[in-house]
């Protein structure tokens, strides 16, 4: 992956972290980078980053043990909350 792409990706992660902190007040984050076709939805040369807000005593075990996804609100609501934080990137 070219250095400019990595720099852009890290900068976007910083903006996302700020947006998530402002809107949801998490106590921490999990960040992970998926690299390659097997890790990136079957796309060769694919690279993407996950940034997951976390809270002490959250129910993170649910996705592993219970095969369940927990969403605190519907995705259109999350989009409306986070979108203004990304508008400055245009």
Image: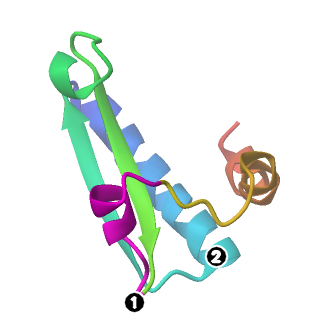
Q: Is residue 4 left or right of residue 11?
A: left
Q: Which residue is mark 2?
A: 24
Q: Are marks 1 and 2 in contact (CB under 8 Å)?
A: no
Q: Which is the main secondary structure of the residues drawn in magenta?
A: loop
Q: Nearer the viewer, residue 40 or 69?
A: 69
Q: How many marks?
A: 2
**For mark 1, does the 10 Å Cα neighbourhood hold few (<14), some (14 to 19), or many (20 or more) residues?**
few
Q: Which residues are magenta?
A: 56-68
Q: CA distance from mark 1 to mark 2?
A: 13 Å
Residue 66 - label: none
**Circle 1 SS class:** loop
**Circle 2 SS class:** helix
**For mark 2, does the 10 Å Cα neighbourhood hold few (<14), some (14 to 19), or many (20 or more) residues?**
some
Q: Is residue 73 left or right of residue 25?
A: right
Q: Quadrant of residue 90?
A: top right
Residue occupying image coordinates x 54% and y 58%:
15
Q: Is residue 43 visible?
A: yes
Percent x, y of residue 79: 75, 49
Percent x, y of residue 24: 64, 76
Residue occupying image coordinates x 17% and y 21%:
38
Percent x, y of residue 21: 57, 75
Q: Nearer the viewer, residue 78 or 65?
A: 65
Residue occupying image coordinates x 21% and y 28%:
39
């Amino acid at each position: 992956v070219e250095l400019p792409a990595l720099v852009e990706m890290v900068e976007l992660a910083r903006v996302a972290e700020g947006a998530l902190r402002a809107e949801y007040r998490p106590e921490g984050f999990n960040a992970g980078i998926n690299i390659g076709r097997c890790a990136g939805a079957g796309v060769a040369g694919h690279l993407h980053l996950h940034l997951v807000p976390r809270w002490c005593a959250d129910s993170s075990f649910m996705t592993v043990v219970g095969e369940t996804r927990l969403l605190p609100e519907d995705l259109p609501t999350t989009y409306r909350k986070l979108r203004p934080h990304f508008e400055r990137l245009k």
